[in-house]
Image (cartoon, rainbow, N blue to C red):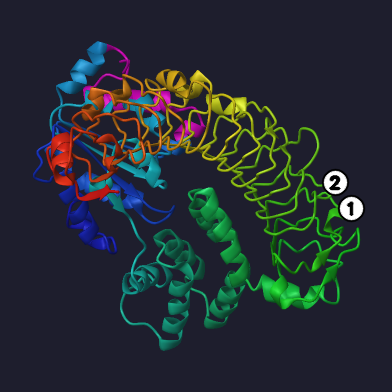
Amino acid sequence: MSSSDNKNLFGVAMKIQKIRSLLFDESNEVRKAVGLWGMGGIGKTTLAFAVFNEISSQFEASYFIQNVREASNKNQLCHLQKELLSALLEDGHLNIRLKFTQERLRCKRVLIVFDDVTNLKQIRELIGDLENLGFGSRIIITTRDKQVLKNCRLDDSTIYEVKGLGSDESLRLFKQHAFKQNYPIDEVFLKLSERVVNYTKGLPLAFEVLGCFLLGREKIEWESALDELKKYPNEVIQTVLKISYDGLSDKEKTLFLDITCFFKGWDKYLVGTFGSHIGGTDKIRGMLFDMAKMIAIHLNPHAFSEMANLRLLIVNNSRYNNKVHGFDSIEFDFSELRCLCWDHSPFPSLPLKFDPENLVVLKMCNNNLEQLWMGIKNLSHLKYIDLSYSKHLLIVPNLSEAQNLECLILEGCTSLLEITPSRNLNKLVNLNLRNCKSLISLPNGIYKSMFLKYLCISGCSKLERLPEDLGNLESLEVLEADGISVRELSSVMAGWLSGLRYLRRLNLNRCSLTELPDDIDKLSLLGDLELEENNFESIPTNIKNLSKLQLFNIRLCNRLQSLPKLPRNIEELRADESYALNEIYYKAKFVLKVLGTLPKRFFYL
């Protein structure tokens, strides 16, 4: 595809120009990667392919690796690697782990596109370290998850967000598929086309699907089809939307389901029917109780018995005015339920027969739960749990069967004594235990998670120990541990540092630290370091090697005698006079002495 061919791609010319400017700026880097991210079906692959075809002739070798995610799921990355090396080095029998192969790659200026990547490991399996590529090489990575690009060490200056088409471009693209033309059309069909554009919200793949579906149909068929599509998207459109849905984070998925429920009018429909008839029907897929608009509901034990296909249950409840009664006595297993969202639930437990076999999202904040269920359940689909501020919750059940769990939020569960030891939490990304004040230990399973990025144990004042194998969390980016009182924390920390190579934020405020590890400079990507109100007397001199450090907080460290030279890139220094003692008398002198320059923001309190 030449640059002239790209004129046939709607809304792509300016985007190609922007991406090219990111790839070929004035930095003259040895090698450079650029990331494209956006929802599924938004046009990332099309855009990357257009750029690839325009610039590939400028390189000694080039290759476009399509559908990395799909190949990874099918265990076919090895096959893709052979194709890649065959294209770049004209030899598909090489091993990327061999030094000989790496040396050959370093001698070539190449262009590679990694399309639809879901984690850094996939790229490493295909090409090893990107540093293996030769001078002037360029890499394009497309993904639905911006964090993947961050893990590949790309920053905002090299990440391009691919957004939907504008209304004019959307209409042109749809007309091309629905009428096989771009010239003016009948006013009636124009109005109908505008409804389609409004329905698809700039998603190119959806325009193609709907355009092909409506091609050649009469006006009455269009109207009927669009009315039905608003209520029940056809199977192809559902596939398009599923692509986008699968690319969302778990919090975004929950929000998406909420919005979908409101747009389909389920709240109004169900509020109107539940007042008089709660028997239900096997056609119901989702239910929303907006309790602010409803009178009290008294559920009988068999109220849901005919709702065998119920997948979504959302209750918007008031903290101070419960209007739902009898839910904990329901004689129904809810086995098809995908999403349960019920903040301020008044019940101490879920129904006895509750079966979470297909549950994906469980969100029940500020509730009266004491336990969820007894024993080990099949939780293979469960990805998101938020039970924050469940102040009566005593124990989290065994989650060993939740092998796909990515997010566990238990913030403010002040009575929580134990998270039952659980294996197989290998996909956990976010674990929030903030202010779980009764918790005495962390679940063993988390230390084997290759993907855990965020761990918050701030306010867990009764934690007795933190094991040294916390350093096994090689993907960890944020560790919040404000106010913990673990014995010998200083010595335990020394065992972490070499493993936490991607850590960007470390919060150890109020942890009674008496010393800092001598090799703290191993945290080479650290950007925020919070050490307020601790008891150490000195800071290792090699802290100056933390070149990424931007925020440094040492307020109320009253035993601190002096400071070594600090990194010059610090933008925010939070300090007070207590440790300056006789060495430094004036604020400006103090800052200039330890930094060599004034930071952008200096809190001298």
| Residue 481 position in % (x across, y down) | 48, 36
Task: Give the magenta-colored segment's residue range.
Answer: 71-98
In the image, residue 85 lies in the stretch drawn in magenta: yes
Specify few, some or many for label 2: CA neighbours under 10 Å numbering under 14, 14-19, or 20 or more.
some
- State whether residue 233 appears in this view: no
Specify few, some or many for label 1: CA neighbours under 10 Å numbering under 14, 14-19, or 20 or more.
some
Q: What residue is pinned by disc 2?
A: 353
| Residue 218 position in % (x across, y down) | 53, 79
Mark 1 touches mark 2? (CB < 8 Å): yes
Answer with left or right where residue 340 lies relative to residue 554: right
* Mark 1 / mark 2, whichever is N-terminal: 1
- Residue 112 versus residue 498: which sits nearer the camera? 498
Q: Residue at position x 32%, y 70% from top?
A: 169
| Residue 126 position in % (x across, y down) | 35, 26
Q: Residue type at mark 2?
A: Lys
Secondary structure category for the residue under label 2:
loop
Answer with left or right where residue 387 lies relative to residue 247: right
Numbered label tally? 2
- State whether residue 408 appears in this view: yes
Q: Residue at position x 27%, y 19% from top?
A: 91
Answer with left or right where residue 532 lies relative to residue 213: left
Q: What residue is pinned by disc 1?
A: 331
Q: Residue type at mark 1?
A: Glu
Q: Residue at position x 89%, y 53% from top?
A: 331
